C-alpha cells in the first residue's frame, strides 16, 4: 500500500486495522505472533482487534481460527471495500488535504470547527500533516489561512500521489476524481508512446492548477528542445495547453516499455538531448542506459523539476537530488524490464463445472505468481511474450508450452505440473 496512504491516517487503531487486513488479504493465513511482529504490537492487541474486525465487517468476510493461525477470505468484496472506505471517512486528514489543494482559506479555529475537533486536536493533526509535507515534498502550510506553499512541480506531485496512487479512497477523494472529465482522451500513434492513463491524470491536474492561476514556470533556454517535445506531444494527443505544460506531461507520461530497447533510448537521446551535437555510438547496452537516464533527468530539471524526498531512509549524507532521481529511474527501469521478461500469456482450455474451472484457474494463477511471473490473459500472444496453455482435457498434440492436468486435478498435481515453467 502507498506510504502516503498510511501517513494520512491519524487514528492509530484504524491504521493498525488496515495494516492487519492488508497482511491477511495478501497472506490469507497468518498466526497471531506473525501479525504482532509485522504490526509492532502485542498478541493481546491482535486478539482484541480480530474480534472487533469480525464484528465490524460482519458477513463481508470470513475470518476463522485463533492466535495459532487465522485464515481470511472474502464473502462479499464489495461490501468489505465499502466498510473499509467508511473507516477512512472518519479520518480528517484526507478532507483537509483535498481542501488545501482546492485552495480553501480557513484559520486553524475555523478548520477545527469544520472537522468537529478541539483546537488542540486539530493542532496535533496539522503538525503531523506539516511534517509529512516537509519531509516528503518540501512543501509547507502558511499558518494564517492554511494555504499550501512550495514549488509548483512539488505541489502537483503531491496532488498526483493523493488522487491517483492510494490503494483505497475515502468518499471525499473518490467524489473529487469522479467529478473530473472521464479519462478517455484518445491517443494517436506517434513516434513516442505515451501511457494513456498517466497522460490523462497529469492533464487533469495541470488543467486544475491552470484554472487556479498556477502554471509551471517557463525556463529560458533550450527552446529548440522544447519545440521538439511539443511536436512529439501533439503527434500523439491534442490538448490546448501552454508549451511548458505539454513538455512536462510528455515526460511524465512516457511509456517505459518502449525504452527496453536500447535503440529507442538512443533515438530519444538524439532527438531530445539538451546538449548540442550528441551522436552516441551504441557500444554497450548498459552504457546507453546511463546516458538515457541522464538525459531524462536533465529534461525533468528543465521542464518539471521534482522536489525529492529528504527522509533519512531515502538519502545518505552528501547524496544529491540528481543521484536520487537517477537511482529511482534505474529502479523503475529494472522493474519494468523484469516484469517484461517474466510476462506470461496464460490460456485456459478447461472442461467440467464452472466451479471446478474457477478453482483450477485460481490455483494456477497463485503458483505462477509465487514464481514471479506477470500474467497476461485473454490477449493474443506476440513473439515477445511466452504463452502457456493449461488444460484438463485432451489436446490434439503435445507441446512444450502445454500443462495437461487430470480431469479433476489435485492441488499437488497442479503445483508439480507448473514446476516445468522455469523460463
Image (spheres, rainbow, N blue to C red):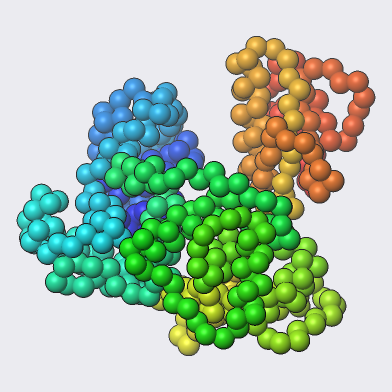
Q: Is residue 203 left or right of residue 379?
A: left
**Which residue reaches farthest front?**
240
Horizontal side of residue 403 vs 214, given as left or right: right
Q: Count the numbered circles shown.
A: 0
Residue at the (18%, 62%) spot, across then down: 105
Q: Residue at x 69, y 39 (%)?
A: 376
Q: Can the viewer see residue 307 in this picture? A: yes
Q: Is residue 42 above or below residue 415?
A: below
Q: What x and y, as percent, mark residue 392?
A: 76, 20
Note whether residue 93 is visible.
no
Q: Position of residue 101 (x, y in %)?
A: 30, 60
Residue drawn where x is 73% and y is 42% of the image: 344
Q: Quadrant of residue 122?
A: bottom left
Residue 275, quarter of the rendered image:
bottom right
Q: Nearer the viewer, residue 276 or 285?
A: 276
Residue toward you, 352 or 201 = 201
Does residue 391 appear left or right of residue 175 in this picture? right
Front residue of 54/142: it is 142
Q: Residue at x 65, y 56 (%)?
A: 236
Q: Residue furthest top?
A: 353
Residue 21, how many percent across, how many down? 38, 40
Q: Is residue 217 above or below residue 115?
A: below
Amino acid at each position: 500500500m502507498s506510504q502516503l496512504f498510511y501517513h494520512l491516517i491519524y487514528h492509530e487503531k484504524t491504521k493498525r486495522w488496515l495494516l492487519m487486513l492488508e497482511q491477511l488479504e495478501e497472506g490469507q493465513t497468518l498466526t497471531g505472533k506473525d501479525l504482532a511482529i509485522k504490526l509492532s504490537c502485542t498478541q493481546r492487541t491482535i486478539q482484541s482487534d480480530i474480534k472487533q474486525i469480525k464484528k465490524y465487517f460482519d458477513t463481508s468476510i470470513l475470518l476463522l481460527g485463533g492466535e495459532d493461525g487465522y485464515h481470511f477470505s472474502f464473502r462479499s468484496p464489495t461490501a468489505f471495500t465499502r466498510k473499509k472506505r467508511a473507516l477512512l471517512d472518519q479520518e480528517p486528514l484526507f478532507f483537509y488535504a483535498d481542501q488545501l489543494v482546492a485552495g480553501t482559506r480557513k484559520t486553524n479555529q475555523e478548520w477545527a470547527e469544520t472537522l468537529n475537533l478541539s483546537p488542540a486536536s486539530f493542532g496535533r493533526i496539522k503538525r503531523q500533516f506539516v511534517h509529512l509535507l516537509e519531509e516528503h515534498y518540501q512543501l509547507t502550510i502558511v499558518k494564517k489561512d492554511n494555504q499550501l506553499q512550495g514549488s509548483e512541480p512539488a505541489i502537483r506531485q503531491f496532488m498526483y500521489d493523493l488522487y491517483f496512487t492510494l490503494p483505497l479512497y475515502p468518499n471525499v477523494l473518490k467524489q473529487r476524481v469522479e467529478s473530473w472529465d472521464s479519462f478517455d482522451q484518445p491517443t494517436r500513434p506517434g513516434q513516442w508512446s505515451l501511457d494513456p492513463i498517466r497522460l490523462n491524470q497529469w492533464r487533469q491536474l495541470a488543467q486544475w492548477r491552470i484554472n487556479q492561476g498556477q502554471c509551471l514556470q517557463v525556463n529560458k533556454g533550450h527552446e529548440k528542445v522544447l519545440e521538439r517535445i511539443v511536436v512529439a506531444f501533439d503527434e500523439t494527443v491534442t490538448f490546448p495547453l501552454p508549451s511548458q505544460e505539454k513538455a512536462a506531461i510528455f515526460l511524465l507520461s512516457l511509456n517505459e516499455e518502449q525504452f527496453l530497447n536500447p535503440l529507442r533510448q538512443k533515438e530519444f537521446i538524439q532527438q531530445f538531448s539538451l546538449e548540442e551535437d550528441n551522436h552516441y555510438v551504441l557500444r554497450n547496452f548498459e552504457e546507453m542506459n546511463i546516458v538515457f537516464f541522464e538525459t531524462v533527468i536533465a529534461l525533468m530539471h528543465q521542464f518539471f523539476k521534482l522536489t525529492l524526498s529528504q527522509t533519512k531512509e531515502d538519502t545518505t549524507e552528501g547524496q544529491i537530488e540528481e543521484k536520487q532521481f537517477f537511482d529511482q529511474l534505474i529502479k523503475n527501469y529494472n522493474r519494468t524490464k523484469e516484469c517484461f521478461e517474466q510476462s506470461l500469456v496464460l490460456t485456459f482450455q478447461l472442461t467440467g463445472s464452472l466451479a471446478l474451472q474457477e478453482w483450477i484457474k485460481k490455483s494456477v494463477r497463485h503458483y505462477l505468481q509465487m514464481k514471479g511471473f506477470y500474467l497476461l490473459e485473454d490477449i493474443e500472444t506476440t513473439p515477445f511474450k511466452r504463452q502457456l496453455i493449461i488444460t484438463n482435457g485432451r489436446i490434439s498434440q503435445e507441446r512444450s508450452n502445454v500443462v495437461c492436468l487430470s480431469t479433476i486435478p489435485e492441488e499437488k498435481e497442479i503445483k508439480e505440473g507448473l514446476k516445468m515453467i522455469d523460463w
